[in-house]
Image (cartoon, helix red, strand yellow):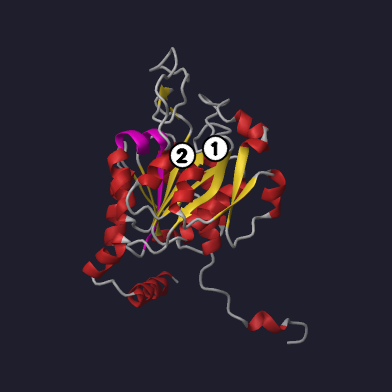
Amino acid sequence: MFGLKNDWDLEPPPRYFTLEDYEGGVARWCPGCGDLAVLTAVQKICRDEQIPPEKTVCASGIGCSSRFPHYMNTYGFHGLHGRALPVACGVKARRPDLDVWVATGDGDCCSIGAGHWVHATRYNMNMVVMMFDNHTYGLTKNQSSPTSPVGYCSNTHPEGVWLPPLDPISATLGFTNASFVAQTIDWNPLHLYQVLRDAHAHVGFSFVRILQRCPTYTSMMFDELQQDPSKILLIAPDGEELDPTLTRTYKNTVKHDPTDIDAARKLGSQNEPLPIGVLFRQPDHPVYGDVTERGIGMGAREKLEALDREMDRFMV
């Protein structure tokens, strides 16, 4: 027909997902909470990767951040305190075709869930684990957490915490078979998105520590980092170009080989300046899911791809 563009006879994709397809209930976090930025980043990654909502699972434990599954229009499991990882590993073991995200807090992961944290890292199953670290138990109204800094006053330590905080990055880098460890901040949406995107692209257990502001109890905790970009060290992985927006914001950068575990441990143990980015990435470590996939007759990648096509056929 006269006037029609030549490409108008192309069939549109049977399904195309927008951000709205991943939006669940209205988020009930406090205004200004860093959790909102993480939620948006994950929804954007799901949209950009066109991951079907029915093939996505969010697992969590207990805490403010653990309400994450309620706000994603996907499958979700809001579990018990510290038990997000065994649930996620169970889901991945029996349904390796599903995309698994884990939301856990500094108390949920590093305290009651610490044993699961160690072994889930060693299993190296293919999932993204987001540890929201605001240095406090916010949902239960301000108790000290394993990552609370010395001197922090809380309901459980009114005169201030006296023990040094646990370092989640150094700890994870010390666990056997750790394959992806990164650190980011909630107040830079671009960096947050890129780190979570890299974590999602990695095949294995991707652990991402997110420094996350709590406007109610630790609103001043990260003020220096926010106000003075020189206190942040931007990691530039070898062979990768950083976004110019990030390099304009953070002048301190360091070239880093993410496959060098010793360099990652040295870099990850420092706090002044605070390193952000991918500290360690080793795609060759054994993935426990490869064994479970074979056990349920899904060892070949071709079978997984065939299952994807079959599911898509029924969803059209």
Q: Residue at x 47, y 25 (%)?
A: 149
Return the residue found at the far left. 295
**What residue type is disc 1 on?**
Gly
**What residue type is disc 2 on?**
Phe
Q: Is there any visible trace of residue 72 in the rendered image? A: no
Percent of width and height locating residue 159: 44, 12
Dividing the image into 4 quarters, which one contains the N terminus?
bottom right
Q: Residue at x 54, y 73 (%)?
A: 13
Q: Is residue 11 left or right of residue 230?
A: left
Mark 1: few, some, or many residues within 10 Å (few <14, many ≥20)? Answer: many
Percent of width and height locating residue 75: 38, 53
Q: Residue at x 74, y 82 (%)?
A: 4
Percent of width and height locating residue 127: 39, 55
Query: Which structural element holds mark 1?
Result: loop
Give the label on residue 132, or none.
Answer: 2
Between 175 and 54, the residue placed more toward the observer is: 175
Q: Is there any visible trace of residue 311 in the rendered image? A: yes
Q: Is residue 67 left or right of residue 31?
A: left
Q: Is residue 57 left or right of residue 9?
A: left
Q: Earlier in the sequence, mark 2 or mark 1?
A: 1
Dividing the image into 4 quarters, which one contains the C terminus?
bottom left
Give the label on residue 34, or none.
Answer: 1
- Of tags 2 and 1, the one toward the viewer is 2
Task: Find out whether residue 116 is within the magenta segment.
Answer: no
Return the residue found at the far right. 3
Which residues are drawn in magenta?
98-113
The answer to whether the residue labelled 2 contacts the one labelled 1, judged by CB atoms less than 8 Å apart, is: yes
Mark 2: few, some, or many residues within 10 Å (few <14, many ≥20)? Answer: many
Q: Is residue 45 left or right of residue 226?
A: left
